[in-house]
Image (cartoon, helix red, strand yellow):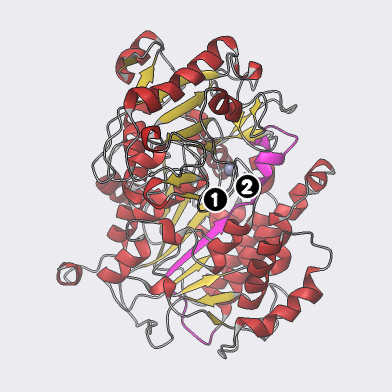
């Protein structure tokens, strides 16, 4: 259950294709001995002090971080149950990927999907119904895919959010400030894993089959796997410390491509390593797609096309070849998934709702008399904040404390109590209502919000109520009625997806007020607003079709497309959500007759 928190074991030495320096003898050694390597390797990287330690650790890890004691690890045995490869592609729009595949422009990925017979993908089923969770952002998406639970159950409400009972702001992907420490800690210290309130798909697979062997490559969630494959410093760190200048110079594409090629190289090396059998479950995660789309001069669809058809696709071909050579593809299901799509925004930052104090969302709360938590990862333990903001692209969460118990400046609020509805929650909602209507507190906020959502708070341990629409003067309107009067034809399944986010044990992590920026309507980027600390060319997170439709492909070289469709529909139904990927994976690897006993 808690394998990922086990001993930190590094493997270093034999050079391989993926980098030149470290890998795989099985001799563990303490992290400290690797640190001097960083001094040589990091060169001119300008990074924060706390990040340096994380980078040192990352370098020390080499290519493989063993997550389980070797004695615990599986000795994969010959079995007739199929194996699995999961290919996660961050930010990949369904239409873009399927068009490329169907028109034969991705021969590499195609070779992982059983190839082409008579011009058709005869061994792959391309699902066209799956929707990302709301908000359609990275962490919420992958958490649902790898736990089988929506956000109100998994605890991952966004890329950054506030945990009231711990008085702790967490930011696996910081959006309202710049700090990459947690991004690195996700790989070195289980930062994102540790935020999960439920078991991962890997832990559930292990419950089903204790000796199963699982290798995961740079995905944020890997608890329960045997090993985490990490691309070397040159790949990961260059990306994390990408300067805006590099992007402006057009270097972003090459940088992100290089990164993903190295990520795939590490996986290919792992497959080729004949010291051990190929893992039963392999997960590989490509993220340059999303990173490049955010920064690209071209619209996101073209950015995604360009990225997928480049050298990354060649690496998929190499991975297929390596698997074939080891006889590890013939009875392997391949599941391709993405976490969200993308929507272009104006490239001049005029629609960015920034994190700056003046004329931006923070000014609304401070103007209305709240003591706002500074937009940064950590604050002093005795900080007296009574309001918190968290950004998720087109939406933002506002959390407020019960201010009656900490009214005086300097008094620390008890965040484990729910706030008062009128005096705290509606006061914040009204402040944003006024800002949106007249520019009060922050002139730039005028006409930037589509909706302000709020609800009566409930005690922490209880299930939270659904959000309603705040229409001013203390009044709330049920979402269904509001959407009846003001239809949002571009949005898909907003009501049910909002419930999945906000109604449940961890529903309060979506805040007391949700600000929904004007975004996702119409075909052009004009007037698409987003909350961010840095200008973007494209964002995602809204309930729009463009942001929400995700990839789900199920392939197996020994099965027909029709058979695969039946399997997928049997598990997913015809109107599916990302969190059902876990159900599909568990179903694919079930060993008849065994699992019933194992689950007991
Ligand atoms: Zn993104």
Q: Residues within 10 Å of mark 1 (few under 14, many from 20)?
A: many
Left or right, residue 150 beside residue 113: left
Left or right, residue 118 beside residue 266: left
Pointer 1 or 2: first along the chain: 1
The percent coordinates of residue 428 (x first, y second) are 45, 25
Badge 1 element: strand
Residue 420 vs 150, above or below: the answer is: above
The quadrant of the image that shows the C terminus is bottom left
* The residue carrying mark 2 has its beta carbon less than 8 Å from ligand 1: no
Q: Residue at x 27, y 32 (%)?
A: 465
The percent coordinates of residue 304 (x first, y second) are 64, 41
Left or right, residue 358 beside residue 440: right
| Residue 7 can be seen in this image | yes
Which sits in the foreground, 343 or 329?
A: 343
Q: CA distance from mark 1 to mark 2?
A: 7 Å
Residue 116 vs 95, above or below: the answer is: below
Residue 89 tag number: 1
The percent coordinates of residue 589 (x first, y second) are 31, 65
Q: Residue at x 38, y 82 (%)?
A: 74
* The residue carrying mark 1 has its beta carbon less than 8 Å from ligand 1: no
- Quadrant field for ligand 1: top right
Residue 200 vs 366, above or below: the answer is: below
**Which image quadrant for residue 30?**
bottom right
Which sits in the foreground, 420 or 310?
A: 420
Residue 289 tag number: 2
Q: Residue furthest bottom?
A: 27
Q: Which residues are magenta?
A: 274-303
Badge 2 element: helix
Q: Is residue 292 magenta?
A: yes
The quadrant of the image that shows the N terminus is bottom left
Q: Residue at x 33, y 40 (%)?
A: 507
Q: Contact (CB < 8 A) between labels 1 and 2?
A: yes
């Amino acid at each position: 259950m808690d394998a990922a928190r086990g001993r930190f074991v590094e493997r270093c030495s034999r050079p391989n294709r993926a980098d030149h320096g470290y890998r795989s003898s099985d001799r563990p050694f303490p992290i400290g001995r690797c640190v001097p390597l960083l001094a040589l390797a990091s060169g001119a990287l300008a990074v924060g002090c706390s990040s340096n330690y994380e980078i040192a650790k990352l370098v020390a890890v080499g290519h493989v971080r063993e997550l389980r004691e070797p004695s615990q690890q599986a000795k994969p045995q010959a079995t007739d149950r199929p194996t699995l490869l999961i290919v996660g592609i961050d930010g990949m729009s369904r239409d873009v990927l399927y068009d490329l595949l169907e028109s034969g422009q991705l021969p590499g990925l195609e070779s992982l999907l059983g190839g082409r017979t008579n011009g058709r993908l005869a061994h792959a089923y391309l699902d066209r119904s799956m929707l990302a969770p709301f908000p359609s952002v990275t962490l919420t998406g992958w958490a649902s895919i790898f736990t089988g639970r929506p956000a109100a159950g998994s605890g991952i409400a966004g890329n950054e959010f506030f945990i009231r009972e711990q008085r702790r702001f967490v930011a696996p992907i910081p959006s309202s400030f710049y700090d990459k420490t947690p991004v690195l800690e996700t790989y070195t210290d289980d930062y994102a894993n540790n935020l999960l309130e439920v078991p991962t798909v890997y832990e559930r697979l292990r419950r089903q089959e204790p000796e199963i062997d699982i290798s995961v490559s740079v995905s944020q969630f890997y608890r329960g796997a045997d090993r985490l494959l990490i691309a070397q410093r040159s790949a990961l760190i260059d990306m994390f410390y990408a300067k805006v200048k590099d992007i402006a110079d057009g270097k972003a594409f090459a940088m992100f491509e290089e990164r993903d090629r190295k990520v795939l190289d590490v996986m290919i090396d792992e497959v080729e390593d004949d010291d051990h059998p190929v893992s039963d479950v392999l997960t590989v995660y490509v993220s340059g797609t999303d990173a490049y789309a955010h920064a690209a001069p071209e619209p996101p669809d073209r950015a995604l096309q360009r990225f997928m058809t480049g050298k990354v696709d060649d690496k998929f071909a190499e991975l297929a070849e390596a698997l074939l050579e080891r006889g590890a593809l013939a009875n392997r299901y391949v599941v391709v998934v993405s976490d969200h799509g993308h929507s272009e925004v104006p490239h001049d930052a005029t629609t960015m709702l920034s994190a700056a104090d003046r004329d931006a969302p923070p000014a609304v709360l401070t103007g209305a008399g709240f003591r706002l938590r500074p937009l940064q990862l950590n604050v002093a333990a005795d900080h007296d904040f009574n309001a918190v903001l968290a950004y998720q692209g087109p939406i933002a969460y506002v959390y407020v404390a019960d201010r009656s118990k900490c009214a005086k400046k300097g008094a620390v609020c008890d965040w484990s109590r729910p706030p008062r509805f009128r005096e705290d929650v509606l006061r914040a909602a009204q402040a944003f209502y006024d800002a949106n209507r007249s520019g009060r507190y922050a002139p730039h906020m005028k006409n930037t919000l589509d909706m302000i959502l709020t609800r009566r708070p409930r005690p922490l341990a209880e299930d939270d109520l659904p959000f309603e629409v705040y229409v001013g003067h203390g009044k709330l309107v049920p979402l269904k009625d509001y959407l009846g009067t003001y239809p949002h034809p571009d949005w898909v399944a907003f009501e049910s997806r909002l419930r999945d986010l906000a109604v449940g044990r961890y529903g309060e992590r979506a805040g007391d007020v949700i600000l929904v920026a004007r975004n996702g309507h119409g075909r052009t980027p004009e007037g698409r607003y987003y909350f961010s600390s840095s200008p973007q060319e494209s964002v995602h997170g809204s309930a729009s079709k463009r942001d929400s439709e995700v990839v789900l492909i199920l392939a197996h070289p020994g099965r027909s497309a029709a058979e695969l469709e039946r399997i997928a529909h049997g598990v997913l139904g015809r109107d599916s959500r990302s969190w059902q990927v876990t159900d599909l994976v568990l179903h694919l690897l079930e060993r008849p007759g065994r699992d019933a006993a194992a689950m007991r």
